Image (cartoon, grey):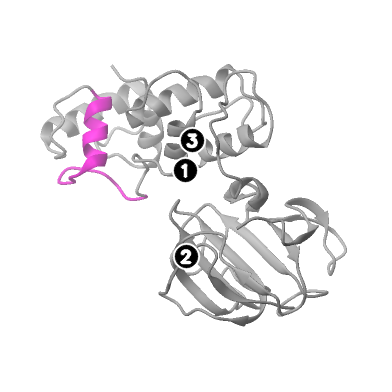
Amino acid sequence: MSFKAYKITSKYGDRIHPIKKQKIFHAGVDLVKVHRSPIESFTDGSVLFAGNGIKGTGLGGYGLCVVVKDDKNKLILYGHLDEICLIKGAKVKKGEKIGYQGATGNVTGSHLHLEVRRIPDEAAPFGFRQNRRDTTVDPLIYFKTFTNAILKRGSKGNNVKECQKALLLLHYALPVYGADGHFGKETEEAIKLFQSNEGLKIDGIIGRNTHQKIQEPSIKYSGHFIQKGSKGKLVKFIQRKLNIKRDGIFGLITEQAVYSFQRNQGLKSDGIVGFETWKSLLNYPLN
């Protein structure tokens, strides 16, 4: 799929809302063919929702819509459809018809609202967060194939910014410049840490492998406490960062090592890896 078949009537970013008549961030792109033209899927994936978007579900205002979780763990929203051709739970292939262009929901005319959400909630709110700018991706960038282009210190632009936003969402620190679209020393150091944590070649350069891992990281905070009795790859990662035996079992030795790390970092010392301890571990160089 490409955008060649569509006229782009509203891009991703700040705009004057056509109904509210005020400046509001537009978290997707508006695409137009002809009313009731077939709308094909931009990706392979699984249908998480197919129906009328209701207020409070993260889909309010989008009328008849479809949400697809793609193979990069992103949610693709197709909004304002006139008719839907798929059901929840269906598997969809790139290029497969998902519905027809329409004017349902809050619209001023027939079009497709296409949105890419970073947070893969499989139920309401389907990746919707109030901070739309940092929890969505520009579809015009996302659906362009990532070629062998290399991003490194000195690179600038939207591709750099999208990678920086992904790093921040994974809790890597960019404390001075944030996601500014400029690949400087701060971004380079964060990329090196990311590469080290993910077992990639550590060069501070975003090539194909690093870019793919940023989209689909192996190491990602679960949102739950990791503590005595926990098991698995996140425990093994913690043990690797603390330079202790890596057996994937959070026992007494791991608990004591976490205590020591927390004290040294000025954190609450409870031997439990919660969000703040996780962030500190993530941004702590491997021994």
Left or right: residue 195 compared with residue 177: left
Q: What residue type is labelled 3?
A: His
Residue picked out by circle 1: 215
Q: Residue 30 at x, y = what percent? A: 74, 62
Q: How crowded is mark 3: few (under 14 residues within 10 Å), some or many (20 or more)?
A: some
Which label's residue is closer to the chain start, 2 or 1?
A: 2
Cβ–Cβ under 8 Å for marks 3 and 2: no
Mark 3 or 2: in front is 2
Residue depicted at x 49% and y 25%: 190
Q: Is residue 50 above or below residue 277?
A: below
Left or right: residue 199 compared with residue 8: left
Left or right: residue 180 compared with residue 230: right
Residue picked out by circle 3: 211
Q: Residue 73 at x, y = what percent? A: 44, 53
Cβ–Cβ under 8 Å for marks 3 and 1: yes
Residue depicted at x 20% and y 44%: 232
Q: How far apart are the two marked residues, 3 and 1, measured between alpha carbons?
A: 7 Å
Q: In this view, does 49 lie above or below 145?
A: below
Magenta region: which residues? 223-242
Secondary-structure class at tag 3:
helix
Q: Tell me which corner region of the image, top left, top right, bottom left or bottom right, holds residue 218.
A: top left
Q: What residue type is labelled 1?
A: Gln
Q: Which amino acid does label 2 sit on?
A: Lys
Q: Residues within 10 Å of mark 1 (few under 14, many from 20)?
A: some
Q: How far apart are the two marked residues, 2 and 1, measured between alpha carbons?
A: 20 Å
Q: Quadrant of the N terminus?
A: bottom right
Residue picked out by circle 2: 93
206 magenta-colored:
no
Q: Residue 6 at x, y = what percent? A: 74, 62
Secondary-structure class at tag 1:
helix
Residue depicted at x 17% and y 43%: 228
Whether residue 176 is visible here, answered yes or no, is yes
